[in-house]
Image (cartoon, rainbow, N blue to C red):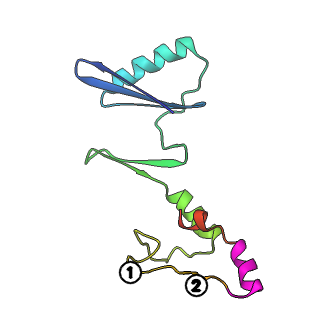
Amino acid sequence: MHLFSQATGGEYIYLVLYIDDMLIASTNRSSIDKLRVRLLSKFEMKDLGEAKRILGVEIERDRVKGKVSLTQKAYLQKVLQKFYIGCEANSESSPLAPHFKLSADMLPKTVDKREYMSYVPYASTVG
């Protein structure tokens, strides 16, 4: 991913590029339009309008409050479904409570339990 910012009169234009996805952001709409016209004159590209999503990240705007939020709700729901966790599950900032200690005694004891655990993608589940 490349990030380019250019200051003109104290104003910034951000161009984020990843393979064939591009996002242009600025506080000044006319600056975005000028850059877009320059890019269209040099490159073949499609203008898909105002960004609602890029690289799996949803973009939500509250223009009244002047806020932009980035979320991955769809990705999170996909992960929860993959591991059969309902959306009513409680969130935690850490997968384990601070007082929780792991030990070798907790390893699966039977062949069946070890085989079952070998199919649990732990890093994907807690990641």
On the image, the x and y values in percent for residue 126 come to 54, 67
Judge whether 71 appears above or below 96 on screen. above
Q: Which residues are magenta?
A: 109-119
Determine which of the numbered discs, if any, sits on residue 39 in the image: none
Judge whether 45 appears above or below 122 on screen. above
Judge whether 91 appears above or below 62 on screen. below
Residue 87 drawn in magenta = no
Q: Quadrant of residue 98?
A: bottom left
Mark positioned earlier in the residue sequence (2 or 1): 1
Q: Helix, strand or loop at disc 1? A: loop
Q: Residue at x 75, y 78 (%)?
A: 115
Q: Left or right of 18: which side holds 24?
A: left
Q: Main secondary structure of the magenta part?
A: helix
Residue 114 drawn in magenta = yes
Mark 2: which amino acid?
Met
Q: Residue furthest left?
A: 10
On the image, the x and y values in percent for residue 52 come to 48, 44
Q: Helix, strand or loop at disc 2? A: helix
Mark 1: which amino acid?
His
On the image, the x and y values in percent for residue 44 come to 61, 18
Q: Left or right of 39: which side holds 83?
A: right
Residue, disc 2: 106
Determine which of the numbered discs, if any, sits on residue 99 in the image: 1
Observer-nearest residue: 98 or 5?
98
